[in-house]
Image (spheres, rainbow, N blue to C red):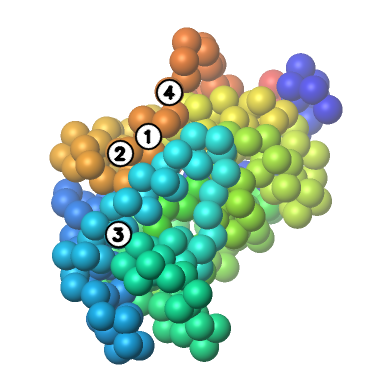
Amino acid sequence: MSILDADDCTVKAVTFDLWETLLFDRDGASARRADARCRNLARTLNGLGIQVSVEEMSVAIDETVSSILTLWETNKDVACIDQIRLIIAKVSKDSSKLKREWVNGLVSAYNLSVREVPPYLNPEARTVLDDLKKRHKLIGLICNTGLTSGAGLRQFLADEGVADYFSLMIFSEEIGIRKPDPRIFHLAAEKLGVQQCEIVHVGDNLKADIWGAMNAGLKAIHFSSREGRDRIAESDPNSLLSLSQKLDNLEGRKVVPDMTISSLSMLTKAIEQLERRS
């Protein structure tokens, strides 16, 4: 179905971006999380017989991030275990040292930092998710991950008590595709059992979320709030989030979302307005 046909469809499902839409970071959290990741991974590798200092691990992760960012420019992603393999190759010069029996421990160490330096849930998220559920809307998540795996983020959302609201969670590192590639949105529609035009996608990023969703035939609501991405970009310009945002340049494209909201509390009314247009 083309984008021009989208107004003929009612809203059956709502998909959300995660970072800077449902989850926010506190000032400096990204840097503290990176330090924790270095310590945890170095400690785990040392226990497995691969001697590496925290400083060496920091350099290896920074070099790996540079290569990952290059891949992200093509809307592709790297699985968590492959990120770890790239890091180990830099500190040991031999990625074959990653033994199968080590995988779970290394992934746990890699993900532990999100629990040690946690983000915080958008204060309005639970109320909005509960309201959508009461309105019998299917709820999905479409997330471009960073260095925390989909498994780690699922566990965090479960710990926060909101995971059960979602009928579907798609994480880029698990499928190898990042927004705005239309395939990630088409996959969401397929898994939710609805047409693309029956989904409203909500996100903060004009390219990844809004242009991406509309280009894939979804409706799109732009969540424009300074509480998240602008503050983080200003306070921590070298964070992975800030670096990834630089990839989301619209390059002159003019994107006009179906609706714009400055608070998640505005979402249900915005969806009602979209449905009245249908």
Position above or below: 25 against 269: below
Give the residue type at disc 3: Ala
Compared across the picture, whether 153 is left or right of 92 comes to: right
Q: Residue at x 52, y 13 (%)?
A: 253
Q: Residue 275 is drawn in which quadrant?
A: top right
**How far is disc 3 from disc 4 in space, using C-alphas?**
27 Å
Q: Position of residue 21 (x, y in %)?
A: 41, 44
**How far is disc 2 from disc 3 in space, using C-alphas?**
20 Å
- Are circles 2 and 1 on residues that touch, CB within 8 Å? yes
Compared across the picture, whether 252 is left or right of 245 comes to: right
Along the line of sight, which residue is nearer the eye, 207 or 75? 75
Label located before the other in sequence (4 or 2): 2
Position above or below: 11 against 4: below
Q: Which residue is label 1 attached to?
A: 245
Residue 267 seen in the figure: no
Give the residue type at disc 2: Ser
- Are circles 1 and 4 on residues that touch, CB within 8 Å? no
Q: Residue at x 50, y 83 (%)?
A: 99
Q: Position of residue 240 (x, y in %)?
A: 32, 46
Q: Which residue is label 2 attached to?
A: 242
Density class for disc 3 (Cα within 10 Å; few <14, some 14-19, many ≥20) is some
Which circle marks residue 249 in the picture? 4
Which circle marks residue 60 in the picture? 3
Give the residue type at disc 1: Gln
Q: Position of residue 76 (x, y in %)?
A: 57, 44
